[in-house]
Image (cartoon, helix red, strand yellow):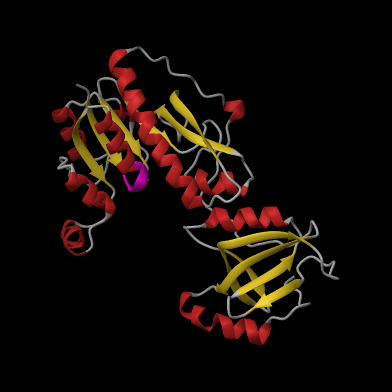
Amino acid sequence: MLKVVIIGYGEMFTNLIAGTLDANCQICGVLRKEMIKYPKFIRKIKDILNPSLDYNYIRSYNLPEIKAKSVNSTEFKKLLLKLNPDIILVGSWGEKIKKEIYDIPKIASINAHPSLLPAYRGPNPYFWTIRNGEKVSGVSFHLIDNGFDTGAILAQEEVKIYNSDTGKSLKDRTVLTARGVVCELLNALREDIIIPLTQREDKASYYSHPENLELDFTKSAEENHALIRAAFPWTNAYFYHNNTCIAAHHESLEISENDTEFSQPGTITNVNHRLKRISVLCGDNKILTFNISLYKKYDRPFTPNYIKREMSIGNYIL
């Protein structure tokens, strides 16, 4: 039976745990992000008063927790040497793992990355693949090395991107796919020899955290539609109207043909202050309809009044 240590946080972390259990492997230790994010006293209070999904998941399976301040700490290294794992699995983590740590397992240290590597290396492929209009994303399991998402690939599976996908819905399907892939990978590592596939650097791309979130209505309705969907659930795409920042929301997004007399991109073609909803003409002569709110949370209750008072058909956003 393979002995596995799992490091991570969030949905990828919990799905790696589930997939490892599906493969009938022994999870000899787990390290969640809260162990390094919070001081011990605060973490204990949080675990009692406001336990995270990760903590509840770990407790539900009675998994042994590793207590360490960093994956690169001396205490973590000593615990790993004592546990003597066959495999380390990483599912979402902010620290770059040092060679002296990822070399410890008898078989390999493996990272789960939510894209089809070598494309879309970096922290948030969910956002970037949708924003860039990709039709397919995926999940890749690769060996950990000295780079970021650069190690040789052990397993990959595609995940289709739908026109209605948000960053959240794509993430939900991707981590569920990762559960199945890690189960198959662990079974294969136990029974067969897997030859890692070196990533092609000429095909590589790297994207950082979400940025450039301002809508540009001189661009197509589809491009703006994609940006609004990609930003959820982490943040909101936005635009400025009379120097006021307005957040765009992903619910009930629609693209329609322009049947109005307007031709200038950025023209407001319809307004509904009760539903907090507007329609705007885009650069491809199509109309994008979406829900809005004043960007700052404490201002949002005043959104209907702002729309009624400040926005009207024929106004320009640009």
Query: Residue 312: in sight, yes or no?
Result: yes
Q: Main secondary structure of the magenta part?
A: helix
Nearest the camera: 113 or 82?
A: 113
Q: Is 145 left, or right, of 304 in this rendering?
A: left
Magenta segment includes 37: no
Q: Is residue 215 above or below residue 310?
A: above
Q: How many marks?
A: 0
Looking at the picture, how far across and down is residue 76, in whole percent? 20, 38
Q: Residue 104's image quarter?
A: top left
Query: Residue 35: in sight, yes or no?
Result: no
Q: Residue at x 58, y 45 (%)?
A: 162
Looking at the picture, how far across and down is residue 201, in whole percent? 57, 27
Q: Residue 95's image quarter?
A: top left
Q: Which residues are magenta?
A: 8-12
Nearest the camera: 77 or 245?
A: 245
Q: Name the quadrant of the N terminus.
A: top left
Q: Residue 46's image quarter?
A: bottom left
Q: Is 147 left, or right, of 128 in this rendering?
A: left
Q: Is 138 left, or right, of 274 in this rendering?
A: left
Q: Residue at x 26, y 52 (%)?
A: 34
Looking at the picture, how far across and down is residue 303, in whole percent? 56, 80
Q: Is 169 left, or right, of 63 in this rendering?
A: right
Q: Name the quadrant of the C terminus.
A: bottom right
Nearest the camera: 31 or 78?
A: 31
Looking at the picture, how far across and down is residue 268, in whole percent? 74, 73
Q: Residue at x 36, y 35 (%)?
A: 179
Nearest the camera: 11 or 83?
A: 11
